[in-house]
Amino acid sequence: MNIGIVCYPTYGGSGVVASELGKVLASKGHKVHFISYEQPVRLDFFSENLFYHEVTVSNYPLFQYPPYELALTAKIIEVVKNSNIQILHVHYAIPHAAAAVMAKKILKDIDHIKIPVITTLHGTDITLVGNDANYGEVISYSLNQSDAVTAVSESLKNDTYKYFSIKKNINVIPNFINIEKYKKDENACSRRVFATENEFILMHTSNFRKVKRIEDVVEIFVKVNNKKLSKLILAGDGPERSNIEQLCNKYNIANRVYFLGKQDNIEKILSISDVFLMPSETESFGLAALEAMACGVPVVSTDTGGLPELNKNGFSGYTANLGNVNAMSNFVLKIIESPETLDNFRKNARLQAESFATEKVIPQYENLYNTILNDSI
Ligand code: GMT
């Protein structure tokens, strides 16, 4: 199958899911054409089945806002025609779904080419950005005009129905994980680099946006560290980083916190971590938590959005109400209270992650592609 994938190229979860999906589809023999404004971060290698088409937006003094959506639409049309794309899969509603629907209409009306569009919703496109009343009608229209819509959790599916006027069925296809790559590897990284033998290691990775509530990560850590000496590893980068550095100074814990910045092989650091923290305000799925669980790291998270679908309370970790840092720190202490308890949670976390293994999830996308293609003949 010739598949076009439109996505953000950055470290954000939707770009990672789209890139990993494309890589697996390519390994199964499909020709996958990525369309984005930069080479997606995880596609920096050669494969005979992977192609990258860059969207370039021409600038002109009149444009205060260069028309990215138009450039993207034009690029989609070009790629569909030149590469005989059979199905177009766009990740993140804004503005990708709207551009794809416009391209689909132009291809039908001008070139008499039928191109089915699948839109995958990832979270903030619906829960944060999409909720902006200005975008409502465009998003509803683009989703209704897509041939299929998928969401990464039941929770996101319900939010989409709540916030937008959607008349079609939304398929839930969760995030997935390569459980061969993401697994605990004792030799990957020396625990001693970060902590002494008696200290525990708490970890958080994200794009350091407000929605991640990293100040809660710090407060949970302070409470845990008061009872059991620990270290905190923060991986990733983004707008909140300097605020968080200041908060660590305020709590006098700067010498206990490591800011690692963006990391490509996060599984190595996860391998030496004891508990992963995800106190997000909202999280449609929580890919970073899934990566942690695959590496045998139990998760303490909020119970917002799709997190309870991933993190099974009392099994793979614990979930608590948004902002309840007391409960979350107590849950961390409960997990690390004995080596046996920690070991049980580690095993359960891995077990739970295995239910989201690539081999179980990717066929759901392939089946959807086949159904949509058959329907559109
Ligand atoms: O918030 C992020 O980490 C980025 C964002 C994105 O769209 O790039 O992630 C969303 O999509 C991921 C992949 O489907 C999900 O695992 C994340 O939970 C989701 N983030 C939020 O809902 C806040």
Image (cartoon, rainbow, N blue to C red):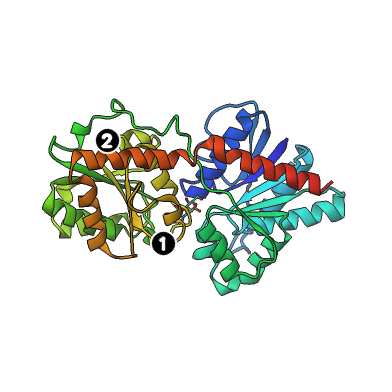
Q: Earlier in the sequence, mark 1 or mark 2?
A: 2
Residue 113 location (% of width, % of height): 84, 47
- At 55% across and 38% down in the image, what residue appears? 360
Query: Quick one: label 1, few (<14), some, or many (20+) residues within 10 Å?
Result: many
Q: Is mark 2 within 8 Å of ligand 1?
A: no
The disc labelled 1 sits on which kind of residue?
A: Thr
- At 48% across and 57% down in the image, what residue appears? 284
User: Is 173 left, or right, of 70 in this rendering?
Assistant: left
Q: Is residue 244 above or below residue 359?
A: below
Residue 172 location (% of width, % of height): 58, 53
User: Is 51 left, or right, of 270 in this rendering?
Assistant: right
Disc 1 versus disc 2: distance between alpha carbons? 27 Å
332 or 163: nearer the viewer? 332
180 or 26: nearer the viewer? 180
323 or 351: nearer the viewer? 351
- At 66% across and 36% down in the image, what residue appears? 32
Circle 1 SS class: loop
Q: Which residue is mark 1?
A: 304
User: Is 68 left, or right, of 129 in this rendering?
Assistant: right
Q: Is residue 278 visible?
A: no
Q: Which residue is mark 2?
A: 272
